[in-house]
Every structure is written in structure tokens, then in C-alpha cells.
Image (cartoon, rainbow, N blue to C red):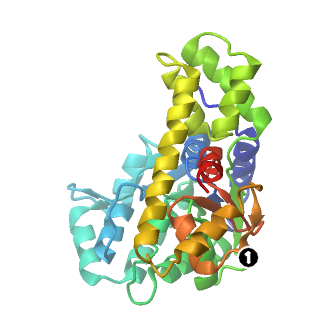
Amino acid sequence: MKFFNREKEIREILSILEFEPNFIYFIYGPINSGKTALINEVINKLDEKYVVFYFDLREIFISKYEDFIEVLFEEYEEDKDPIELVKSLVKDSSVLFGIPTPKNTLENLLSKKKPKNVFKYITNILLELRKEGKQPIIILDELQKIGDLKINSFLIYELFNYFISLTKHKHLCHVFCLSSDSLFIEKVYSEAMLEDRVDYILVDDFDKETALRFMDFLAKNILNKKLSNEEKELIYSYVGGKPVLIIKVFNKLKYKDLNEILDFMLKDECSKLKRLLARVKIRKIGGVEYENIINALKLFKENYIVDEYIVDEDTKEYLIKKNILFLDPIESTLRPQSYLVWNAIKKII
């Protein structure tokens, strides 16, 4: 299906790429707001000047240093010089899902278990690409997966100091980090001392006007018919501007009644919230008090957005990690992860 909207964000990222690397960019937003789809659309628009190293941490279990290294590298059996291997692969594709590395070289890097050796190796690859007239780009998707991993102090600290070297110091490589966990972004910012070294790009759910246009787009491409304004308003009242939820509704409209679809989605979201509250009530989870959870959720009975500082830190962290609330670290605000979650909160609390 044709990519929809996000012209503003695409223009912003393409504009960044026209200049020499200077900052690390956090692409953040609520869950399922379209961050990965956006960056993939940007990649599709790049010319052969750019070489993208795309590291997707989404489906990788990372519990130790070796796990993280395996994500960074793509092993090749060929007994080639590492630089020549990368050059040969870049001729066929401008997107590489890992740093191409001969097997023996990778085994050597893994055996030493030192981040600096790994980063030095990557830097040499990037420098050679620049000599070839290429502009490297590093993209880490679902960055929060490395949040609790430690090796010789925090991996986060080591990794982002390396990214600072690549961007602000050497101006060698653009770096984009995607995450829906804005608490983790705050943690990275403070622990890696990133002041004046990072910038932020928010990929939010659609506003109402865009959401309604998206519905027209889906009605034409999926249903091959138009929806009434009343039907579109009803969909928006349930799921808001969350792209993935709007798509879910339209996929089901091919064989189900609209009211049935929306009622089921809300009941399902209510059930999830009830189960979460029941578990917290039975026993403390992570030191979170049931009454504090209830009081925090009550704030959203009349409001969609509240100041983050009116909720205690433990409760805020728990509700964010459980994907009930979304923290915007730039605005210092909290809101439900979606209209659907908001409707569930209003119905249950």
C-alpha cells in the first residue's frame, strides 16, 4: 500500500542528511505511531550516495555483550578483506542490515569483548566508505532493548560516546535512534551526557484532520468505497489518530459491521487494563501502589494530556513501561498511548 503523509518529517530528515553529521537524532513517539515506516520511507528516497546500516533490535533477545555484537555485524564465510567485502556489497545495495564482516574477523572481535575494539573496526569501515564518496548512516530501531545491558560500565555510555565521536567530532556518519520508550531516551540523555549533542524528531499519531484524510485514503484503497462523515467521526472517537488502529478497523470492515468492530476493540482494551489493575491490586509490582495507579489514571477522566510531574516517579515509570501512558520528554507531558487506551481508562476508572 502506498505510504501516507509524514511529508513534514520526511523533509526534515532529508534536510538533515544534506548537511555534515553534527548531532545524534532521537526519533520518538507513541507505540505504533509509524516511526519505522517513516524511516523506511526516507531510506527509499535516498540516492546511491548514501549507505545505510540498519540495526533492528525489535526481535533480538539481548542479555549480554555478545548478543549486541551479533546485532551490529552480519557474518560472511568469505575469506575477504573486511573493507573489500563491504565495498562489494555496497555496489548491490545501499541498505545493509549489519556491518558485513568475515567470520574469522568477527570471532576475533567477539573474543576480546571490548567495545573500543568493535567501535574502532566500525570507524575504519565508515572512513573507507567516505573515501569512496559515500555518506554512511547508522539507524538503531527499538534502541531501548539495550537499556539494562552492562559491559565495562554502561554499554549506553560507551555507545553514545562513540556516536558523539562519529557525529559531533568526526562529522563522519549520521546517527538516528528510534524508540517509543521516552523514559529510556531521558535515561540515555542523562547517563551519556548528551547536552548539545542530540536533537529530537517526534513522530506522533495523526491529528484529527490527517486521521480523517487517512480514512478516506484507506476507504479507497482497501474498501473501494467512501465512508460517511459520521462513520469516520465514530472511528476517530474510538481510536483517534493511531495509524495502526485505523488500518485494523478498515481491514475488518471488509467483513464486519463498524459498531461491532469498535465495540470489540474497546472491550479488549478494557480487559487488558482490568487485568493489569488486578495484578497490581493483588500484590505490589515493582514497588507500585494500587491506589497510586488509580489516582494517576483518574487524572485522565477529564484530560487527555497532563503535566508529567503531578504523577510520582514509580507510578509514572510503571504505566509508561506497560504502554498505558506516553511521556513526551520535550513537553514534559503524559497522555494515554492511544485514544483507545484513553477510552478504556474513562470507562473503567
Q: Is 149 or 40 nearer to us in this picture?
A: 149
Answer few, some or many: residues within 10 Å of disc 1's Cα (few below 14, many 20 plus, some between 14 and 19).
few
Q: Is 170 or 258 nearer to us in this picture?
A: 258
Q: Is 88 or 231 nearer to us in this picture?
A: 231
Q: Position of residue 80 (x, y in %)?
A: 26, 58
Q: Which residue is mark 1?
A: 309
Q: Is residue 305 left or right of residue 29?
A: right
Q: Is residue 27 above or below residue 194?
A: above
Which quarter shows the N terminus? top right
At horizontal 70% and vertical 25% (from top left) the residue drawn is 232
Dot 1 amino acid type: Tyr
Q: Position of residue 158 (x, y in %)?
A: 49, 82
Q: Is residue 163 visible?
A: no
At horizontal 58% and vertical 84% (from top left) the residue drawn is 191
Which quarter shows the C terminus? bottom right
Q: Is residue 167 left or right of residue 36?
A: right
Q: Is 65 or 109 nearer to us in this picture?
A: 65
Q: Position of residue 269 (x, y in %)?
A: 51, 46
